[in-house]
Amino acid sequence: MRKQLRAVRIGAVVTFILMAGGRARAQAPAPAPIVDSTWAAKPLHLSLNTTYATLQALDVISTLQAIHSGHGQELNPMLGDLVNHPVAFGAVKGGLTFATMFAMKRYAKEHPKAAAITLIAMNIGYSYIVSNNFRIAAGR
């Protein structure tokens, strides 16, 4: 913030000096705020959100398969009773997925790097959960 204010002050002084010279000159646009474009890139966040949504869908499928195989159980106490109602289970997981993606999109506006790293961590965690669910469903 201080660097931006300093840059604005310097820009204002330079503009004043140039205008005082009597010649008309085009004013340069104000410098854009410094944002690490790598972490703020829309394709990055789109791919992370797509992966997250896909993993959530696979989590629903693999959880239901593991439970119906007789080898698994839902360990999340908030969703434990819903696994007997697959449509309700999928709807709740879909709503939670949408809410998480919406929150991360808002968070990414001010903290794109933190949002991307959080989504990466959640994707890694759910990758483990989904693979474990499929392993249990296969009876291994």
Image: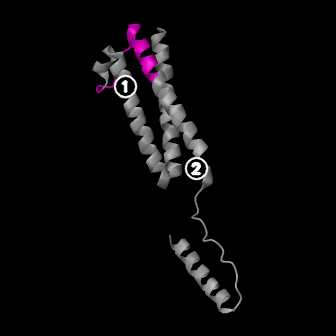
Q: Sequence-wise, which precedes: disc 2 or disc 1?
A: 2
Q: Looking at the picture, does residue 46 appear above or below residue 22? A: above
Question: Can you give x and y, in whole percent of width and height, for residue 76 in the image?
Answer: 33, 25
Which of these two is toward me, 81 or 70? 81
Q: Which residues are magenta?
A: 59-78
Say whether residue 67 is magenta.
Answer: yes
Residue 95 visible to an observer of this rendering: yes
Looking at the picture, tell me which residue is in the foreground, 17 or 2. 17
Apparent side of residue 75 relative to residue 108 in the rendered image (left or right): left
Mark 1 lies on residue: 91
Amino acid type at image mark 1: Ala
How far apart, in angstroms, are the residues tagged by discs 2 and 1? 31 Å
> Which residue is drawn at the image coordinates 45% and 18% (left, top)?
61
Contact (CB < 8 A) between labels 2 and 1?
Answer: no
Amino acid identity at mark 2: Trp
Residue at (50% x, 38% y) in the render: 121
Where does the image place residue 138, in percent across and percent down from the top left? 49, 9
Residue at numbered disc 2: 39
Q: Secondary structure at mark 2?
A: helix
Residue 34 in the image: x percent, y percent? 58, 63
Q: Secondary structure at mark 1?
A: helix
